Amino acid sequence: MRKFALYIGILSISFTSCDYVDDPYPEVIGTNADCDTTFNFTSVPSNQRNILLEEFTGHKCPNCPDGTADVQAIKTALGDRFIPVAIHPNPNEVSGFDSFVNENPPGTGKYETVWYVNGSGEIMNFLDVYIGLGLPTAAIQRNLNGPGNFYFNLGSWGTVVDTIINNNPTADVGINVAGEFLADGTICGKSEIHVFNSRTDTLRVVHYLVQDSIIDWQLDGSTDIPNYMHRHVLRGISGGDVFGQMVSYPSSSGVISQHTFSFDVSEYTSDEHLYIVAYVYSEATKEVLQAEEIHLEP
Amino acid sequence: MLKKAALISAGLFMFSTAFAQPDDPGQIHGNVNFTFQQYGEDTLINAVVPPSETAINAYTNLIYTRGKFSTGVRFESYLNALQGYPPNFVGNGIGYRYASYKDDFAEITIGNIYEQFGSGLTMRAWEDRTLGIDNSIDGARLKIKPFKGLILTGVYGKVRVGFNNGLVNSQGFIKGINGELSINEAFGALYDKQMESLENNDIDTPLKATFAKRISEMPLKIGLGGSFVSKYQKDEDPALILPENVGTWSYRLNLQRKGIFWKNEYVYKINDPSTDNRFVYKPGEAFLSTLGYSTKGFGLVLEYKYTDNMSYRIDRGQQLTIGTINFLPALTRPHTYNLAATLYPYNVQFSEVAYQANLSYKIKRGSKLGGRYGTTIAVNYALATSIDSTATISNSNPLYGYNADLFGQRLEDVFFQDFNVTITRKLNKKNKLKLSYINFVYNNDVNQSARDNLGNEVHGNIYAHIGVIDWEHKLNKKNSIRMELQNLTTEEHLGDWATAVIEFTRSPHWFFAVMDQYNYGNEDPERKIHYLLGSVGYIKDAHRLTMSYGRQREGLFCVGGVCRTVPASNGFTVTYSTTF
């Protein structure tokens, strides 16, 4: 009998070793609890491929205004299909760019703004940054520029963007994105990933908070420009997670995966040109399959 | 490292002396195996030359047994690992060590453990060094036999997920329990006990004893089994609530009566989101059934398997062959002929419905059809298809994946089909002939191993026919020659192939072989490539040394449905093995 009790005991302990999860999504802290159900997407997103250009830049980078000019030229030509994000690498996360991105101490009157954010250096690490890489440089759709190299030098960006659009005009993935400002000083939103064609690789979605048209100091060549307009600046990464959320989908096509995101924007006012960029990439190749941006109503 | 190995060995030896008979010196057994490969450039087949230009996989097992005690270590070396070997095998060191004590009631093992519950669908800790699989459990195992017919096994430990100058274990761990009950043996034990009671004049005993004896001796043998396994891995995902403890359990029923046997196992796994299933929270389910009959000269085995979302790893982010806890058997024939084995090997899917029928019949010797020595006919049919799943969209939560009913399948979505017939006949004292026909339907959207001349993946089904003539001729008492001619035809991939093998054996020590695999049907004249390989081997007692030189085609190397990628190579290979 004692033995029997022992066996039952072992079995009982074993059977308690199961965690059934009823709701896979954690509560979104700091945002409206209804956030993830507020938005109902009624249309299927476009499968027209948009191009994400992650421009790595710095306010003390003398050639970076040339990069911004190139980006703006492409934006003018392609409109909504082209989604640039200017990323100031976080010197605490990636080395080699400190002199371009470091801020001056308060009271010095210029270059006091901290442009980098948590994760903005990790992005470069994730994209296999290498010694000797200068700024500005860009990752375009995270396509490879030779073996193991995700970075394209200034001057080639327009050609690379054109090549991608011409060779791969449609995407396997579509994204619906929506978001809103909440009274508690957060932006709350949801994206919906549609997988149009069967794929077998693991996909991830990342949400950026981006701000456009900010007037601040910028070094241009050897000239300090006090009222330079900074464009498409990365202000935050949802959850601080540069790798993003796993897109859950079975191998069949036509499935949808939904993801919530939130940003603390209490330091901004709603009309400061804030917008959201969402993109989906393949974990295996790091290639961005699709990107979308939405501008929030104040 | 050697110092560490010596310390471990000395420690285990000292531990052994505590349990052993003082007059028993014990025994040491083991084996040694190494494969050395030198890689050469060959742009025609895109041969990969690593920076080191050479590679070696080597290991030696040392097992010491003394009375009821045994202990063992394995020294492993990958400097560097062979090309195509999983990336988690690096350096020199000890990858396996254990100590075990066993008597009639219990067996306790500490250290690395290989173990299987049932058919392995819930747990299989095993190794296959040719595939680069070693998922031994590093912890403890207790096996007890409370009474005759019942065996209970419990395991607790981490899972080996790699080798980097020593054992690399998982962050998480597993715990499992398994029971096997033989009804007939248990009633046999009960009968013995009742008979003992009879001597004590228990009046009810004769009736109970008669019943127990009848059950124990009945021709139908009944076996029951059950397993429970749970894995623990911390949830560090900021975006999802992941189950940290994932349990899976199974029930088994085995029946046997004379030449007929029927084995069944049902398995259930709770929500286990992972990279393998795109992080869906749907539970997994599996059912495996094998029905067989054999008698002299005739054998028939029918198998059925249903698996849905049955990937089960210690680390939800792992892929390939790393960190697997369970094993999904392939219901396909493991081919040995070169073209059938290397061009379209089946890679078992985590969700599939599979069938297999194996028929073997020996036509009697002396009959018209059977000839003087008899003729054996083996027929095999295997089919793997998709389960019937319905994608969940819009309103319901996509993280729950899809709906699937147990046994539901989509016959039109064939993953793999194999029909093959082999006829073996000894013609006379000197000649033996084997003829084979193999027909494949290979869905490359699922298997993803076939590539075209430009290296792009081929889409859709590949239909292939293979014919093989295998002739063995004894020249005299010492010398024999064997020849294989194989031909494969297909229109959906790289065209037709042929392989010729000629092998000369001089007993008892030497063999020489030449093999040529030739893609004569490739539409690109420059890709009509000969993959020529020459081998020479020397065997003496337990020692076996083989040297080969030539080309190896890129592709999948599979054993029992578990595969690894093998890159193209051209070079010199030496393998040596021995046991002692």
Image (spheres, coloured by chain):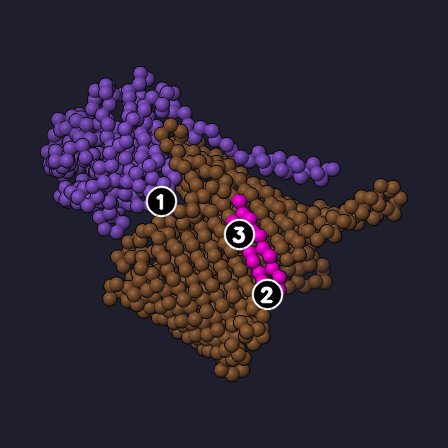
Image position, residue B275 (x, y; %): 40, 41
Report crowding for label 2: few under 14, some 14 to 19, many 20 or more residues within 10 A (C-alpha): few
Report crowding for label 1: few under 14, some 14 to 19, many 20 or more residues within 10 A (C-alpha): some
Instruction: Name the disc covering residue B303, or none.
Output: 3
Please name the residue shown 23% across and 51% down the image. Answer: A146
| Residue ID for mark 2 | B297
Q: Is residue B323 visible?
A: no
| Residue ID for mark 1 | A200
Instruction: Name the disc covering residue B558, or none.
Output: none
Helix, strand or loop under label 1: loop
Please name the residue shown 46% across and 78% down the image. Answer: B481
Helix, strand or loop under label 2: loop
Q: Quadrant of the C terminus of chain B?
A: bottom right
Residue A35 painted magenta: no
Q: Amino acid at mark 2?
A: Gly
Q: Is residue B520 visible?
A: yes
Q: Nearer the viewer, mark 1 or mark 2?
A: 2
Judging depth in this view, the residue of B575 and A278 nearest the camera is A278
Judging depth in this view, the residue of B50 and B125 nearest the camera is B125
Image position, residue B87 (x, y; %): 40, 53
| Farthest residue, direction right | B201
Figure chain in brown: B
Figure chain in purple: A
Q: What span is colored magenta in the figure?
A: B287-304
